[in-house]
Amino acid sequence: MPAMSRFGRLFAIVAWIEAFTWAGLLVGMFLKYVTETTEVGVWLFGRLHGGAFVLFVAVTLFVAVKLRWGWFRTLVALASSIPPLTTLLAEWWLKRAGYLADPADRPAAQTPADLQTTR
């Protein structure tokens, strides 16, 4: 697995921030609607998560262009911001596949012709 680029690290950090604020918002909603004890968690993490969501979308688009992800990876990364905590899965997948590294450091993609064995 190639080392992450500075843009890859930026994406990873923002993905973790987005997931953390999602978790905080979920806890806040539990406290507000289930235990009916306080609304502070929703008030605070609602604002933080809204900002983290917008930041994640902007950083994802920026990094997708810089690291040449293509439309499929970009859409998957963007979609990961909607269900709770799935930005962590997207970050793991992109890192493991080498797409958080500089494009020049990635392993070459295999084409169907590369996969054919010669006889």
Image (cartoon, grey):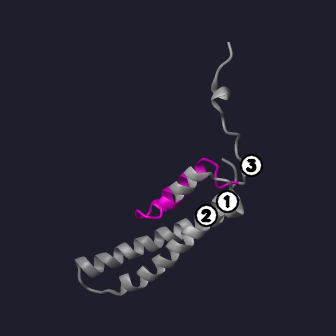
Residue found at x 65% / y 55%:
100
Decide which of tag 1 and tag 3 comes sooner along the chain. Answer: 1
Instruction: For label 3, count other residues whose C-alpha is less than 10 Å away and answer few (under 14), some (14-19) or many (20+).
Output: some
Q: Is residue 83 magenta?
A: yes
- Indicate the position of residue 113 as horizontal and vertical percent values: 66, 26
Residue found at x 76% / y 49%:
104
**In the figure, 100 relative to 49: above or below?**
above
Q: Quadrant of the C terminus?
A: top right
Mark nearest the camera among 1 and 3 is: 1
The residue that disc 1 covers is 65
The residue that disc 3 covers is 105
* Secondary element at tag 1: helix
Residue found at x 55% / y 69%:
56
Q: CA distance from mark 1 to mark 3?
A: 16 Å
- Indicate the position of residue 91 as horizontal and vertical percent values: 55, 58
Instruction: For label 2, count other residues whose C-alpha is less than 10 Å away and answer few (under 14), some (14-19) or many (20+).
Output: some
The residue that disc 2 covers is 61
The total number of labels drawn is: 3
Looking at the picture, which amino acid does disc 2 mark?
Answer: Leu
* Secondary element at tag 3: helix
